[in-house]
Amino acid sequence: MIVLDKIVMPKGFKAGGIHAGIKKAKKDMALIFSEKECSTAGTFTTNKVKAAPVKYDISVLKRPKHGLIVNSGNANACTSERGDEDARKMAEIASSFLGGKAEDYFVCSTGVIGVPLPMAKIEKGIKDLSSSLSPSSEALMDASEAILTTDTCRKEASVKIKIAGKDVIVTGFAKGSGMIHPNMATMLCFILTDADISSSLLQKMLGEGVEDTFNMISVDGDTSTNDTCLVLANGEAGNDEIVEGTEEYALFKQALDHILMTLACMIVKDGEGAGRFIEVKVEGAKSKRDAKKLARSIVSSNLVKAAFFGSDANWGRILCAMGYSKADFNPDEVDLVFSSSKGSIEVFKGGRPHPFSEEKAKMILQEKSVSVLAVLHDGEEKATAWGCDLTYDYVRINGDYRS
């Protein structure tokens, strides 16, 4: 697998991103298109309050697709029957300009909740995009930029693999900065590949990959109404169809997992107001489920996040978060270690406070990327979660969001 240093368009896809007037000035609509039908896979928010485009995409998920249309600046969530009609109308408009049926296109929206879509602007935006699509990587960057909301940067990744002598590209781009919590995040993620692979295998791989990536990140404890992760594969690379249980299957899964992990960490690093990237590793758990519960509970705790903002080695907050996680573990056996590029320090050992230098701990925790290791000595399972600190800027950004 070759990790590429910039985003690359897979064969057979075209893209575009423009300012359609939904936002005041920034790009706010993106379109992805493939002449050849694509195998598809998708995962969506677990929030009971689902935005209209999420409901629409779930209803058409199993049908092959030619592309997807996305707007930012307006979530089309909590907009009742009109929202449902507008989501479908977006797909119908795309099909009228690009061919096929409405069901051949995914629809996604992100932004402010509770405001109807400005459909005149949406329609003009789709028309303009349809006539200006390009297979260039620059066009894909425009699309990547057009889906952002409070993000401060684009989130993109591409890898190249060889399958039976054919070069295969796997490329992903995402948005997400706030309203991020395990069981997806306030994120849109789109992965494009020219590999030949069935929808059923894509869905299996995506489901497994999301569990260990997007479902293990947290910025603020809120699960969005619009979370969507979609994969489209058009087979234009010309490889033999990937079959489960083969080396090709394992190689493609490695590539997909890399894209998911890279984008998940980019989302956390760009968390609203974030100053520090936090990695939490739990080792020695009785079960994978327990390890995940513990890691997610630690990284999701507002008190833990606040302690990291202050570079405070407050291990008591970590133990507290572990204790209410509902995971099965023995507190009397736990070890805790903080680390960063400045070194590591053990602060809790065998269920007891371990003497340590507060000065050294503060120096370690002042780095931009810090880690927590919790060793349980209960079993062999482990898990990792990712998050960020909780800062004054997070409150400022979200206090001003609608204005």
Image (cartoon, helix red, strand yellow):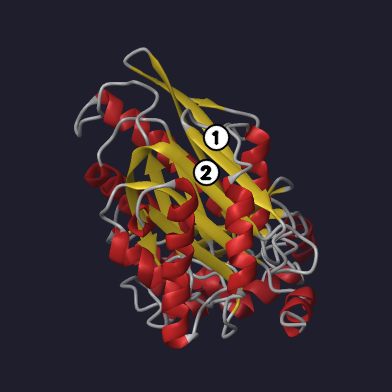
Identity of the residue drawn at 20% across and 31% down: 243
C-beta proximity under 8 Å, tags 2 and 1 = yes
Q: Is residue 290 visible?
A: yes
Coordinates of residue 326 in the picture (x, y in percent): 35, 79
Q: Residue furthest front?
A: 96
Q: Secondary structure at mark 1?
A: strand
Compared to 241, does 268 lie above or below? below
Q: Amino acid at mark 2?
A: Gly
Identity of the residue drawn at 52% across and 59% down: 188
Q: Amino acid at mark 1?
A: Ser
Identify the mark nearer the N-term, 2 or 1.
1
Real-space Cα distance between discs 2 and 1?
6 Å
Compared to 237, does 200 lie above or below? below
Per the image, the residue denoted by label 1 is: 158
Q: Secondary structure at mark 2?
A: strand
Does residue 2 appear left or right of residue 55 in this picture? right
Q: Which mark is residue 172?
A: 2
Callout 2 crowding tier (Cα within 10 Å): few <14, some 14–19, many ≥20: many
Q: Which mark is residue 66?
A: none
Identity of the residue drawn at 55% across and 33% down: 9
Callout 1 crowding tier (Cα within 10 Å): few <14, some 14–19, many ≥20: many
Coordinates of residue 402 in the picture (x, y in percent): 72, 82
Does residue 70 appear left or right of residue 305 in this picture? left
Q: Is residue 282 visible?
A: no
